[in-house]
Image (cartoon, rainbow, N blue to C red):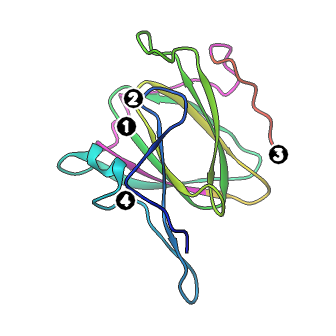
């Protein structure tokens, strides 16, 4: 069992982006993986509830980038596989404007909850040869009018994707 203090979340270098380690509880036949519950530091961000929970599979050799939301906060956990997640802050008044952050998310070594606030660009690709599965618990229901996407090779973000 991973013995994790779930009461604290860690800054990852971009204002508002937090990473919360999550418990993995071994059981016969396969582990139980925590994601959200009262007492987890990032759970308090939801106030009265949450907008929706969905899963997104990412296949090896594919990049899902770049996206940002203007009203929706993302809360990612990767229960299957591993992802390289890249974040870029170009928010006009952010103290971390211009910061690029590359993280690993997923099992076995990086299982946690990643909060991505509004207006932070993000993208991801699987690490290795297996698909990865993201679970996102967003704070509002999906609204296609508030998300912005640009191509993975956009010159407006100073990052060059390399596939494993």
Q: Judge whether residue 148 is colored magenta.
A: yes
Compare residues 45 and 11 and report the one nearer the observer.
Answer: 11
Q: Residue placed at 82% from the left, 45% from the top?
A: 164
Residues marked 3 and 2 touching at CB (< 8 Å): no
Dot 3 or dot 4: first in sequence order is 4
Residues marked 3 and 4 touching at CB (< 8 Å): no
C-alpha separation, residue under disc 3 versus residue under disc 2: 29 Å
The residue lying furthest to the bottom in this view is: 28
Residues marked 2 and 1 touching at CB (< 8 Å): yes
Q: Secondary structure at mark 3?
A: loop
Dot 1 or dot 4: first in sequence order is 4
Residue 36 shows which numbered tag? 4
Dot 3 or dot 2: first in sequence order is 2
C-alpha separation, residue under disc 1 versus residue under disc 4: 15 Å
**Residue marked by disc 3:** 164
Q: Judge whether residue 117 is colored magenta.
A: no
Residue 73 shows which numbered tag? 1
Residue 19, image x, y percentages: 49, 45
**Residue marked by disc 2:** 118
What's the magenta bit mostly, secondary-structure-wise? Answer: loop
Q: Residue placed at 17% from the left, 49% from the top?
A: 48
């Amino acid at each position: 069992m991973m013995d994790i203090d779930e009461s604290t979340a860690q800054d990852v270098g971009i204002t508002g982006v937090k990473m919360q380690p999550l418990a993995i509880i071994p059981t016969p036949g396969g582990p139980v993986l925590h994601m959200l519950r009262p007492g987890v530091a990032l759970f308090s961000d939801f106030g009265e509830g949450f907008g929706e929970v969905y899963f997104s599979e990412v296949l090896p050799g594919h990049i899902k980038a770049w996206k940002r939301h203007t009203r929706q906060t993302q809360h990612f956990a990767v229960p299957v596989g591993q992802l390289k997640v890249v974040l870029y802050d170009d928010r006009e008044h952010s103290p971390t404007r211009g910061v690029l952050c590359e993280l690993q998310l997923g099992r076995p070594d990086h299982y946690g909850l990643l909060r991505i606030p509004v207006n932070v660009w993000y993208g991801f690709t699987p690490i290795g040869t297996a698909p990865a599965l993201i679970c996102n618990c967003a704070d509002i229901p999906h609204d296609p009018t508030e998300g912005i996407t640009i191509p993975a090779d956009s010159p407006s973000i100073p990052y060059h994707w390399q596939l494993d």
